[in-house]
Image (cartoon, rainbow, N blue to C red):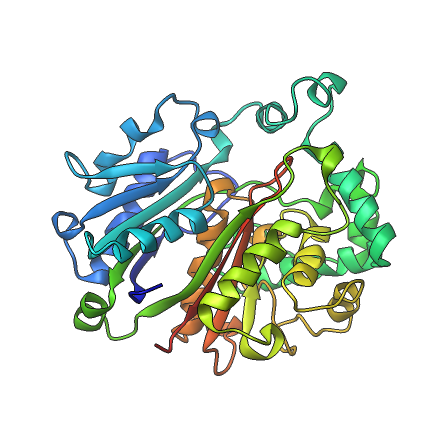
Amino acid sequence: MNERVAIIGIGTTGFSPVSPDLSFKELTYSAAVKAYDEAGLHPKEIDSFITGSEDFMEGYSIFDEYIPDQMGAVMRPAHTVCADFIQAMGMGCMMINTGQFRTIAVEAHSKASNIKTLDEVKAFALDPVYIRTLKENAEFVAGLEMRRFLGDTGNTEEQCAAVVVKNRRNALMNPDAGHGAVLTINDVLSSHPVSTPLKHLDAAAPSDGAIMIVLAAEEVAKKLCSNPIWVKGFSWFSAEGNLWNRDMSEAKYARLAAKKAYAMAGIFQPSKDIDFAEVCDEYSYKELQHLEALGFARKGESGFLTETGATSLGGEMPVNTSGGSIGVGHTFEASGGMKVNEAVLQLRGLAGKRQIKGARTGLVQSWRGVPTATGSVAILSNEL
């Protein structure tokens, strides 16, 4: 990037399995108020607004119409990025780099508890001719990929279960998490099968919540914020669209997105230059697959790193200190935002019991979910 961009304000509602007392608009409004207050800006001082949302998940056509009120963006420039929060954040950074915008507000939310037929909604993304006609759901595809990944890399179901145990325990220390628990590897392995070898506890349960950040150009960030978090690099990539053209043993999208984000941020040795990572763990095996794609482990070694504690809070490379999607909850388009929130807390030294000592640079990564091969990576730092 030619111009340096920072997060100067962030707000979240936290994430919980249900939120019957709040609408998605009220969730978003609550996050927005906190973000603007921290940034020291009124919505009228924001140059443009972005929401990361998907019409089909929201249940509304042209969802842009339902965004401006709660963001303070009525009669102001606003648009929707039909993708994950990290991609929306990247769009905001690029807008600032045009020189036409100095401040951008980025929002994403989840109100999954409102969706009565969530499995059917997720299945609607499957190929309508060859896959959807089989009357299977997204977890069926995830089970196929998990089997291929484990078979090709040598990682094990027990190591995937160790991911669940770690992340659910980390979530107990996160007041924003909705699915913290003390589990054993046997608890995970004995949970009922969903799509062998995928089991019930291997999959992240949905959560509701909202997240908003305020991005600012360097001169604005230095003026308004004493502890800005700099967006050092970001990228996203979409690999093969069809399941039958894809190598399910690796996350190609994460590898290629990371390569570009690392180059932008000047990262040459991820395992040494990055202090912690928040990666997509919508399914337990995905954390292992993404760690290998991101360069934190060689093929087949991510499971060993997990079971030996290298990715735990006290390990050499802490991963998903927030609890990840398994511990916080799967928040769909807001998933990347939840991870950005954790990274900001860590880099500001505000993560409480899960704080990583001396954290300076963190990685956040997201995946768009079954059946996509689309993912995003961003590098954040408290050092300019």
Task: Name the side, left or right, on which 293 lies relative to 195.
Answer: left
From what the image shows, is residue 305 above or below residue 208? Answer: below
Residue visible at 33% across and 56% down?
A: 93
Q: Looking at the image, which is closer to me, 192 or 257? A: 257
Q: Where's residue 8, x and y in %?
A: 27, 64
Residue visible at 65% across and 19% down?
A: 128
Residue visible at 51% across and 27% down?
A: 115
Q: Where's residue 338, x and y in %?
A: 46, 53
Which quarter of the rendered picture does the N terminus lie within?
A: bottom left
Number of labelled discs?
0
Any part of residue 191 in sight = no
Q: Where's residue 273, x and y in %?
A: 54, 78
Residue visible at 59% across and 27% down?
A: 125
Task: Name the side, left or right, on which 205 lies relative to 143.
Answer: left
Q: Residue furthest bottom?
A: 358
Quadrant in the rendering for residue 143: top right
Q: Where's residue 326, x and y in %?
A: 62, 51
Any part of residue 236 in sight = yes
From what the image shows, is residue 22 above or below residue 185? Answer: above
Task: Name the side, left or right, on which 255 lies relative to 378.
Answer: right
Task: Name the side, left or right, on which 211 lies relative to 338.
Answer: left
Quadrant in the rendering for residue 231: bottom left
Q: Looking at the image, which is closer to me, 95 or 9? A: 95
Q: Looking at the image, which is closer to me, 76 or 68? A: 76
Q: Looking at the image, which is closer to me, 214 or 262? A: 262
Which quarter of the rendered picture does the C terminus lie within?
A: bottom left
From what the image shows, is residue 339 above or below residue 43? Answer: below
